[in-house]
Image (cartoon, grey):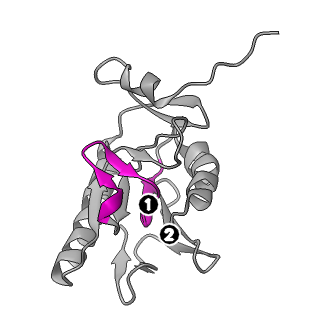
Amino acid sequence: MQKERIYTIDDIYTLPDGERAELIDGQIYYMAPPGRKHQRIVLNLSRKIADYIESNYGSCEVDIAPFAVFLNEDDKNYVEPDISVICDADKLTDKGCNGAPDWIIEVVSPGSRRMDYFSKLFKYRTAGVREYWIVDPEKERVTVYNFEKEATEEYSFGMSVPAGIYEGFFITVE
């Protein structure tokens, strides 16, 4: 019986130029390039979050994919969330973020649905992410997991969605 290969972050760094993948529990998951609608949503959300942080003199940083997040203190987990909000500057290096961002947003693509709703949900919760949003353009829905309050809420596009890590900050996803 052949043993399944366990990959490491070194394997991610040796991928051919232009090829993107994530690593979860030693398994590589290749990523297709995002579509235009996906990128528009990422741009609009990241701009709204960054503007809010800047106008309130916040210290958190907003990063968009491709941005490396090393979730655990091992070499078997590497993800590139669509949007990462990191409030602890000590986690940031030239390579990315070491540890869990405070807030992660993933925009669902046809090929990422299972990963975003299941694998990443579990990984982000156990790694210490405070809040995780899944923005699903096909279903026009935003699912918000506030891990600190152990709460899950769903919102339709066009509704005002509260950002749990910032009291009084709401985003309308369209």
Question: Dot 1: what SS?
Answer: strand
- Asked whether 101 falls inside the magenta stretch, the response is yes
| Position of residue 164 measured from the top left corner of the image (x, y, whole percent) | 46, 80
Amino acid type of the residue tagged 2 in the rendering: Glu
Query: Residue 20's quadrant in the figure?
Result: top left
| Position of residue 50 measured from the top left corner of the image (x, y, whole percent) | 23, 69
Q: Residue at x 29, y 24 (%)?
A: 18
Query: Which residue corresponds to mark 2?
Result: 131
Q: Residue at x 64, y 50 (%)?
A: 118
Position above or below: 35 against 148: above
The CA span between labels 2 and 1 is 6 Å
Magenta span covers which residues?
Answer: 89-108
Quadrant showing the N terminus: top right
Would you say the residues marked 2 and 1 are in contact, meaning their CB atoms lie under 8 Å apart?
Answer: yes
- Asked whether 100 falls inside the magenta stretch, the response is yes
Query: Which residue corresponds to mark 1?
Result: 104
Position above or below: 142 against 12: below
Dot 1 crowding, Cα within 10 Å, few <14, some 14–19, many 20+: many
